[in-house]
Image (tube, rainbow, N blue to C red):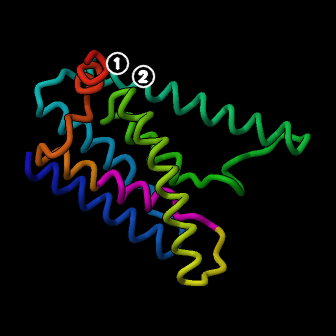
Amino acid sequence: MLLLKTAILIVLSVLFIQDLKSRSVYWFLFPVLVILFIGIRLYEYQSFADILAGSIWPLAFLILQLITLSLYYSLKQRRWTNITTSLLGWGDILLLFCLCFYLSLFNFILFYVSSLFVVLISWAFIRQVSKTIDKNVPLAGLQALLFGLLFLLSAFRAFPDVTNDLWAMQYLSK
């Protein structure tokens, strides 16, 4: 278990460093990350079928978001717009895809929305302080960093288990 968690943190760290330095990441890290996420969930005694079933809803949400974003920009520009050419990198999409295999639906949506907010504010601050002219946000890298922190907090039980929504249901039922 410790080996799997360490490997996940290493992959997330590499994604963060690569994206921050060059705004690109090695593609093979994403399948490795999915395999590690599935591996850790299998180690926690979940069946492969349950893992896949639990990943369907976050994947559906992500696909709906990407379609909505594509339609919005296509309507705005009055022509078909491929969001991966100028708005969103493949690394950003693939990282979110990977997270679908670890996070439950509620936790995925919570992480997705809150990480976009934190990245936006952080990147605006970094650009202001460093006076950088680079407008491209290292979204995958910064989200990998945030997820790594969440993963560590969850691993040390300082944060609820993010692989299921029980903590949210208990919190909301109070």
Query: Is 147 a magenta residue?
Result: yes
Q: CA distance from mark 2 to mark 1?
A: 5 Å
Asked whether the beta carbons under mark 2 and mark 1 sit within 8 Å of each other, the answer is yes
State which quadrant residue 76 falls in. top right
Tag 2's secondary structure? helix
Q: Is residue 48 above or below residue 97?
A: above
Disc 2 residue type?
A: Ile
- The residue to which callout 1 is attached is 53
Identify which residue is drawn at 19% across, 33% down.
Answer: 41
Front residue of 174/110: it is: 174
Residue 10: say if magenta. Answer: no
Q: Which mark is residue 11?
A: none
Magenta region, residue range? 136-148
Which residue, given by chain and number where applicable, does mark 2 sit on? 56
Front position in the image: 84 or 163: 163
**Main secondary structure of the magenta stretch:** helix
Quarter in which the N terminus is drawn: top left
Residue 4, given in percent of the width and then of the height, sits at: 15, 49
Question: Which secondary structure, mark 1?
Answer: helix
**51 shown above or below 149:** above
The 10 Å Cα crowd at callout 2, few under 14, some 14 to 19, many 20 or more, is some
Which residue is at a point 45% across and 39% down the rendered structure image?
A: 97
What residue lies at 29% left-to-right and 55% top-to-bottom? Answer: 148
Q: Amino acid at mark 1?
A: Ala
Q: Quadrant of residue 63?
A: top right
- Tell me which residue sits at (16%, 56%) in the image: 6
Image-based side of 128 in relation to 42, left or right: right
Q: Residues within 10 Å of mark 1 (few under 14, many from 20)?
A: few
Q: In front: 105, or 6?
A: 105
Q: Give how far across and how far down residue 59 sits, in percent.
A: 47, 29
